[in-house]
Amino acid sequence: MSQNKFWYQCVDCGIEYDAKSIIYLCIECSKHNSANNPPKGVLKVHYDYNNLKGIDLITEYKAHNNNLLPLLPIYNIQSLGTLQVGNTPLYQFNKLSGSTSINLFFKDESHNPTYSLKDRASSMVSAFAKEHNINQIITASTGNAGSSLAGICASQNQEAIVLLPKSAPKAKLIQSAMYGAKLIPVNGTYDDCLTLSKQISDELGIYNRNTAYNPITIEGKKTISFELYSNFKGKLPDYIFVPVGDGCIISGLYKGFEDLLKLKLIEKIPTIVAVQAKGSAGIINNLETESFTLVASKTVADSIQVDVPQNFYMTRNFISQYKGATITVSDMEILEASSILSRNTGLFTEPASAAAFAGFINLQKQSIIDSKVTCLILLTGSGLKDSSSYSQQIKTNYSVEVDISEIKKLLV
Amino acid sequence: MSQNKFWYQCVDCGIEYDAKSIIYLCIECSKHNSANNPPKGVLKVHYDYNNLKGIDLITEYKAHNNNLLPLLPIYNIQSLGTLQVGNTPLYQFNKLSGSTSINLFFKDESHNPTYSLKDRASSMVSAFAKEHNINQIITASTGNAGSSLAGICASQNQEAIVLLPKSAPKAKLIQSAMYGAKLIPVNGTYDDCLTLSKQISDELGIYNRNTAYNPITIEGKKTISFELYSNFKGKLPDYIFVPVGDGCIISGLYKGFEDLLKLKLIEKIPTIVAVQAKGSAGIINNLETESFTLVASKTVADSIQVDVPQNFYMTRNFISQYKGATITVSDMEILEASSILSRNTGLFTEPASAAAFAGFINLQKQSIIDSKVTCLILLTGSGLKDSSSYSQQIKTNYSVEVDISEIKKLLV
């Protein structure tokens, strides 16, 4: 491996760490972290942007199978493995039922290998581990992060270990289990699993994928921004709507655009609209507060239901620095948006993704967004991941007899 | 619309029908069809192959967003709509656990818009309907065909109507319902739904998507062959393993290759291996028989569980004409294969797709396939579609206490 091309910087105190050894949080800032508060000391990856300015990044991008290797924390694109991560469909649907015409785009991240955007993080973490000769990766998760790590590790001949509360519904685990992950149900909470996974990493040297904790996850998620830059040929949408839970996906999006900004490839970062469920708005509710107030979360949008947002401070910095917008939406708005989306586009997303679209609908109704702007909705995962959330909306408690005249009545 | 560029021919009696009006089955041959026997009179679409021989099809293909318009029953590629159907990932995994090295490819059709290969048929039917100014499409289905029709119609601003037995589990219907399909639960069997849907088409002029019944479905499914021809730059694999239920996917595959053969773009059709579940082997068990013997089907592979294979006669003709191979696999082999696949590749497929891989494993164990050949496994749909099939395999009925020493014991 050549000299390290990147280093880490603490988003809270600014201390820098070189990348020679594996590090998760800033040693100083993380000293007083507790489970009831968002962790301090999350690290951000920096590159030698000045030296990169001369590089023709678009040519680089195409040369490396749509990867911007100089801006990734790995040295060899082959390390990313076989599965096609990214290169997901971008769709334009200008006129949805009930809305006025607008330049409206959807990025369908459900067409990653394990059917969610999380594969961008998992594949980067997996590649990083490979380049450091590590073969076991652990995470605490009951959802997309766990199944994503499991699937990517399976394809890379690595072992995934997933800690989860034993109360997690079995249906959520089938995908991870099928990929051969070592699932360890813990007689405790999700926070217990988080803590245990970090201890395991410390004591056994097993690489840790926990989002926000591991700075490489953001470097994986940021590739969505490079891809959008390529999809839109540099002319990015005015607004990008993103579902927010822990704040890692939105931070990844910001980080990718920030990289491009530092290289002067873009002049400004689009207005990123952070959308949270009203019942799980830990980031938005604490944007202006001195100390974090924990509220138990509850929302139909499972993937963004979070009590303590693990990437709170980085997200808050980004939103503040790049003048992001925020909106919270109710569960009813989320379910309505998911229905409007699926009925008008054929895109079937999990409720978290529908939340982003609900945010758009809400701002459009308030005429905050007009017909002249271009909007993009980030759809982060497939509706098949969590289809039971929708079962209350489906009414099939009637039936007709085997009689064509009965059916005809329903069709006229 | 210009003059019709294609016509129909009955696969049983050879009578030809022009394409001026919408037609489903051969009028003569279908007269004595009954629910207990595969339908006679399925029609095959023919083009003026002699006139097409001069055309540079590869250039055509690229010019029309990877569509071979001269060989499709539509006149305008735009009719296919917005969603990206096809262009699915092709993966090579030469060495899977427990198997010797071989040139082994997987075509992951779960990355179609509604997560199954059926979208190839639905989008062609939808485009055909659009070009005939028809706005309602009906099908009988409890599974992938229904959700695929629903999703594609949603994206095309058409109405999908899905008839299903009222006994169908709600979980299977959520996706279709979310797309806004009109779901009509019928107090009867799947066969009743099939019959009713055909009556509805006859009496109300609603276009019918039932597979095999509507000859356009095969024309949609055949695009997988064109795509493989493009993926492999004309050098097709020696063996292609395909899960078989009604026989429509395999017939689509044959039909696409037959088109290419007639145009002399390929010299021979690969050996297509039809894989059926032992508990639902209506096609393979009746390949040599004079009259069809109906056996009630039962298999874990829901998507290929079929009592009366609707495309029996066309499939039998193809297998016979192009010297196809056949194999049946047990449910245990299917579940084992799905596990081997997911653990070694990160590909999570529904049991029907795993059946195709089980067929490959079986033939390899028998040394019928050696290391010199190239094989492709057609993965037709996502494991998320039917993940409950796998729940028996997942053992999470243990848990550990919140104690790092307990977890360490599990990891050494």
Image (tube, coloured by chain):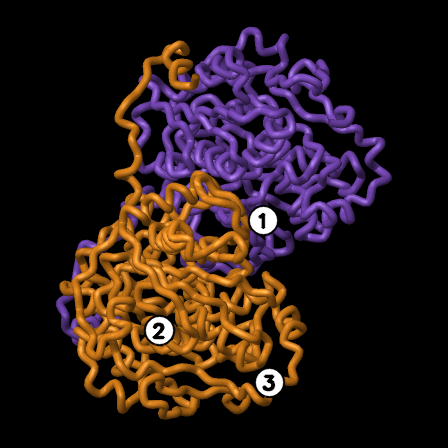
Chain colours: A purple, B orange
In the image, A198 versus A241, the foreground residue is A198
**Amino acid on which the number 3 mark rests in the picture:** Leu
Q: Which mark is residue B52?
A: 3
Label 1's element? strand
Q: Where the C terminus of chain B falls, by quadrant?
A: top left
Residue under label 2: B315
The answer for which chain carries disc 1 is A
* Chain holding disc 2: B
Q: Assign a secondary structure to mark 2.
A: helix
Indicate left or right for B223 with A14 as reference.
left
Residue in the foreground of this view, choosing between B110 and B304 = B304
For the residues labelled 2 and 1, the Cα–Cα distance comes to 45 Å
C-beta proximity under 8 Å, tags 1 and 3:
no
Residue B251 place in picture, x, y as percent: 40, 71
Q: Which residue is mark 1?
A: A376
Q: Quadrant of residue B19?
A: bottom left
Q: Earlier in the sequence, mark 2 or mark 3?
A: 3
